[in-house]
Amino acid sequence: MNRPTDNGYPDPSSPDAIRFAGNVLRALGPAFASLGLPAARLDIMATLREAQLADEQGNHEQATQLRQDAKFADEVRQHIFGNS
């Protein structure tokens, strides 16, 4: 799923790139959590991107499952962090 872009760099909208950004935020610590985009939300965004890619490849059942996983993860995130 990590398709290189035309310039040879990895696709910044790939699920792995989005998860990497979340890991960087986690590594920077709680001071950066105040930016309004918790690292947990980036994991959800990565899962939704995987669902979009699965849809593009015709894997609609997998895409539906990934969206359900993202919805559940978002509900858990909201329960833990509130609506941030």
Image (cartoon, helix red, strand yellow):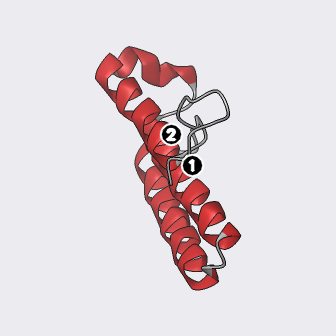
For image coordinates 50% across by 39% down, the residue present is: 18
Count of numbered marks: 2
Nearer to the camera, 6 or 75: 6
The 10 Å Cα crowd at callout 2, few under 14, some 14 to 19, many 20 or more, is many
Q: Secondary structure at mark 2?
A: helix
For image coordinates 35% across by 21% down, the residue present is: 30
For image coordinates 56% across by 39% down, the residue present is: 4
Residue 51 point in image, percent of width and height: 59, 65
For image coordinates 53% across by 78% down, the residue present is: 62
Query: Nearer the viewer's eye, disc 2 or disc 1?
Result: 2
The amino acid type, in three-letter code, at marker 2 is Ile
Query: Disc 2 vs disc 1: Cβ atoms closer than 8 Å?
Result: yes
Say which label, 2 or 1, has the lower sequence index. 2
Q: Is residue 19 left or right of residue 50?
A: left
Instruction: Identify residue for label 2.
Output: 18
Residue 77 point in image, percent of width and height: 45, 51
Instruction: Identify residue for label 1.
Output: 45
